[in-house]
Image (tube, helix red, strand yellow):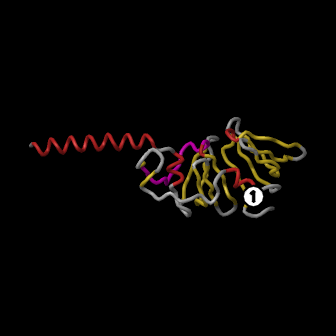
Amino acid sequence: MVQAEQDVEVHEEARELALAEMAAVTLGDRITALGPGATVTATITDASTVKGVVESCAPDHLLLVDDRERILLPVHAIASITGLPRVMHEDATTPIGSPIRPPIHSTWRSVLRECFARMIQVRLASPARTITGALTWVGNDHLSLRDGRDEVTCSWPAVCAVRIPLVDS
């Protein structure tokens, strides 16, 4: 009986510690733990669904590829996602559980800088709008496309997906 009471206390304490650790894990931590080749399905803030194979990931974005294109998803635009590994922290800065792989692209900006002058599609969430054009600028918190004769500049927080064709058409 005494052992059973001690077991209950230990399990309760372990549960509380696990819950406290979970509270410290960010979506970026879990996305960064994805391995290249993993398949995920994400619903983004414009209510559309994106499915693909992980090419690379970082705390601020996820880069997927499907048969036709690469899809850059900002973490802030992911409303829900399947297939994420669980991670815990040993301390306040290092997630443990699934191995953290260094990202191929360190930021969303480095992914887009490879696409200067290429035709891409930028999906904005609110109001829902797709802009197709040649990438002309990648700033710290924005990007610009030449949409016909106008250059359209989009704030990064408004972007919910960038579609990059695998081959230029």
Q: Residue furthest left?
A: 1
User: How many labels sit on residues?
Assistant: 1
Q: Is residue 36 magenta?
A: no
Q: Residue furthest right?
A: 149
Q: Is residue 86 magenta?
A: yes
Image quarter where the C terminus lies is bottom right
* Residue numbers of the magenta segment: 76-88
The picture places residue 61, in percent across and down from the top left corner, at 61, 50
What residue is at 33 percent from the left and 42 percent from the top?
Answer: 17
Q: Nearer the viewer, residue 28 or 147?
A: 28
What residue is at 76 percent from the left and 48 percent from the top?
Answer: 138
The picture places residue 83, in percent across and down from the top left corner, at 49, 54
Left or right relative to 15: residue 85: right
Q: Nearer the viewer, residue 119 or 141?
A: 141
Image quarter where the N terminus lies is top left
The picture places residue 34, in percent across and down from the top left corner, at 52, 57
Which three-letter amino acid code belongs to the residue tagged 1? Glu
Left or right relative to 150: residue 115: left
The picture places residue 53, in percent across and down from the top left corner, at 58, 60
What residue is at 53 percent from the left and 59 percent from the top?
Answer: 101
The residue indicated by pointer 1 is 114
